[in-house]
Image: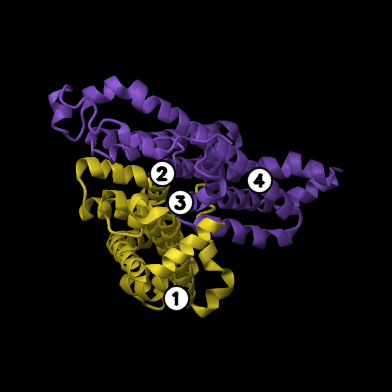
Chain colours: A yellow, B purple
Amino acid sequence: METFIDAFRFLGNNPGLMWEKTVDHLALSAAAVAVAIVIAVPLGVWLGHVHRGSFLAINASNVGRALPSLALISIGLGILGIGFVNVLVAMVILAIPPMLTNAYVAVDGVDPDAVEAARGMGMRPSEVLVRVELPLALPLVFAGIRTAVVYVIATAALASIAGGQSLGDIILNQPTYGFAGVIAGSIAVAALAFAAEGLFALLQRAVTPRGMRKERAGRLVGPAIEGV
Amino acid sequence: MIALADPGRLAQEPVIPEFGQGSDCVRENRQFCWDWFQSRFDDVFWPRIVEHVELTLIAVGIGFAIAFAAALFAHRYGWFDTPFTVFSGFLYTVPSLALFQLLVPITGLTWTSAEIALVSYTLLILFRNTLTGLRGVPEDVKEAARGMGLTTRQILTRVELPLAFPAIMAGLRIATVTTISLTTVAAFIGAGGLGQPIFNALQGGFKTQFVASGVLAVLLALIADALLVIVQRVATPWARARARVRAA
């Protein structure tokens, strides 16, 4: 118990350090998430829109889950060396699968009757996508981003071994910061993960069309029921 | 409780193995030296693979026992679903490196700390998949079983559990692969596994060791995933038969 008290004392005594590393951690995570969104979401949405590539889109998350984050960073260390590029590549690879699968499942699963009705009203395919499919798919797309964000925040801590600036610098540097620092860093990372999870849960709710709110859309493709 | 060696002792290992006497590849620290990997596989990697598999099997085994019992309870008493989902979801969200470290002041640099963290991550997946599988059993099937005079317990063991089996297996598959992934991180609290050679290589930056440990960990996860898919197929022949009927 004393260790935890020391850890909180460490947090109180080093606000500058904690703040700096937290900002680094968030910047690194945000960069990885942004790159992954740009790659995965349009691809998943498009595949879902044309109802093709289910094998790729569904299996992406199965393979993605099998990739140990530390192993990816380690392979990158050997091949790309220490630095931002290695870390970013590993984190983007890990963030893509949940986003891709969710975006695909979300658009692919939009009620065919709604799409049919939109077409009957004379909408062009692009209008169907933007005005019908996307709004209905958005909650699930956000659920995928949310899963990826929590994953990326956890991985950013490990990225410290490959030169990625993050709270991992404190957790993995016991000789400098002492055990109290290690625990303080761990508490900070955990808090960050919960804050991100909560924030994205709110965002997901905000983008859910009012009529769909009762369905608890976000629970459809969480980390649980997959690959059945 | 087995106390593990202090990870600090690892600093005494040679920075680059066989420095000055290894092959050109090893001395120049190229990206991957097959000769070194082959000659050192038995002492550097094999014991770590065994540890990795042990850590994973124990975690998934204990996790399944807890989650399965909890799912049966929640199936019977619906109110239990939400609190257990919230509890296991909470554990699932804590970043792995943080959870391992946070357990050290409580249970020490031990195998126990590693297993508690690993088990924590399996609960949400196994609980939700088992419960969803049980709840997915059609009402009329249960009605028919009741009509045949089966008791609640018989319905559970002879009807509900067999029908929920594919969902339970899918959960076990995800939990196993996730645990293999997280076990690499357990090396940071000295629990061994394939994270250990990665951790050791950090001292000197020997590239072959980074690449080899990483690739072995990925392979282990992919092989486990493939094995479980095969088990799932063999154990549920009716799923394949149904797919064939649908295709025809």
Residue at image position (19%, 35%) is: B31
Pointer 3 chain: B
Residues flagged by tags 4 and 3 on a common chain: yes
Report which residue position mark 1 lands on.
A207
Query: Could you classify mark 1 by the number of other residues whose Cα lies within 10 Å: few (under 14), some (14-19), or many (20 or more)?
Result: some
Q: Earlier in the sequence, mark 3 or mark 2?
A: 3
Of residues A110 and A168, the one drawn nearer to the viewer in this rendering? A168
Residue A47 figure quarter: bottom left
Specify whether A224 is left or right of B134.
Answer: left
Can residue A69 be seen here? The reply is: yes
Compared with B58, A116 (above or below) is below
Closer mark to the observer between disc 4 and disc 2: 2
Task: Kindly report the distance in space between the C-alpha atoms of the residues bearing marks 1 and 4.
Answer: 36 Å
- Dot 3 lies on which element? helix
Report which residue position mark 3 lands on.
B96
**Tags 4 and 2 in contact by the CB under 8 Å rule?**
no
Amino acid of disc 3: Ser
**Tags 2 and 1 in contact by the CB under 8 Å rule?**
no
Report which residue position mark 4 lands on.
B66
Residue at image position (57%, 53%) is: B124
Residues flagged by tags 2 and 1 on a common chain: no
Residues flagged by tags 3 and 2 on a common chain: yes
Report which residue position mark 2 lands on.
B188
Query: Could you classify mark 2 by the number of other residues whose Cα lies within 10 Å: few (under 14), some (14-19), or many (20 or more)?
Result: many
Closer mark to the observer between disc 1 and disc 4: 4
Amino acid of disc 2: Phe
**Tags 4 and 3 in contact by the CB under 8 Å rule?**
no
Task: Kindly report the distance in space between the C-alpha atoms of the residues bearing marks 3 and 1.
Answer: 30 Å
Amino acid of disc 4: Ile
Which quadrant does the N terminus of chain B fall into? top right
